Image (tube, rainbow, N blue to C red):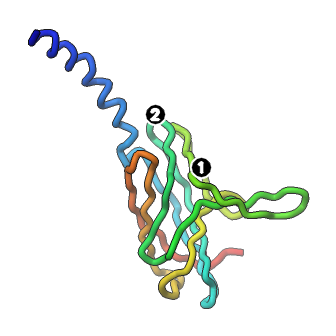
Amino acid sequence: MKNYFATLILLFSPLSSTVFADANPNTLSVKDAWIAEAPPVSKVMVAYMTLENNGTQDITLVKAESDLYSSIEFHETRHEKGMARMIRHNNLIIPAKEHIALKRGGKHLMMFNPVKRLKAGDTVTIKLTTNNDVNQTFEVIVKKSQY
């Protein structure tokens, strides 16, 4: 009986490390993150960055938050029939071993109601949460808007 349980443990221990490997926040890299400085009266700001999934399974982001904003949403600008329209997404999927660029004219983080005026040079802490309740926190710098 002891040998049976020992065999089961040995058989399934490699699986457990594989199953949980992609829940590690180190599989998600955030690069070139910045927030576009907005006019003083603006209630909305936008963050851009590259999100890279170094893991072997897709990462699904379900929430973004910061103490400096009332809410942060996943958005995408789509151009259809000569018109730009904004689409809100409930999640953001980063395929395994790939990256997605959050950029102007595409996907981005839309951040609402800053608690104070943020100017070029300020930093903002953003926390991303996956569908597996794994959190990753990173710093984003506010830059002059580059229109």
Q: Nearer the viewer, residue 5 or 128?
A: 5
Give neighbour class at mark 2: few <14, some 14-19, many 20+ (Cα, 10 Å).
some
Q: Quadrant of residue 103?
A: bottom right
Mark 2, secondary structure of its residue: loop
Q: Position of residue 141 (x, y in %)?
A: 49, 73
Above or below: residue 132 compared with residue 110: above
Position of the C terminus, as image quadrant, is bottom right
Residue at x-position 45% and y-position 58%:
128
Above or below: residue 107 compared with residue 142: above
Above or below: residue 15 compared with residue 47: above
Which amino acid, by three-letter code, is at mark 2?
A: Thr
Q: Residue furthest left?
A: 2
Which amino acid, by three-letter code, is at mark 1?
A: Ile
Q: Position of residue 105 (x, y in %)?
A: 73, 62
Q: Position of residue 86 (x, y in %)?
A: 73, 63
Q: Residue furthest bottom?
A: 40
- Judging by the rendered image, the residue that carries numbered circle 1 is 100
- Pointer 1 with pointer 2, Cβ within 8 A: no
Residue at x-position 50% and y-position 53%:
62
Q: Mark on residue 56?
A: 2
Position of the N terminus, as image quadrant, is top left
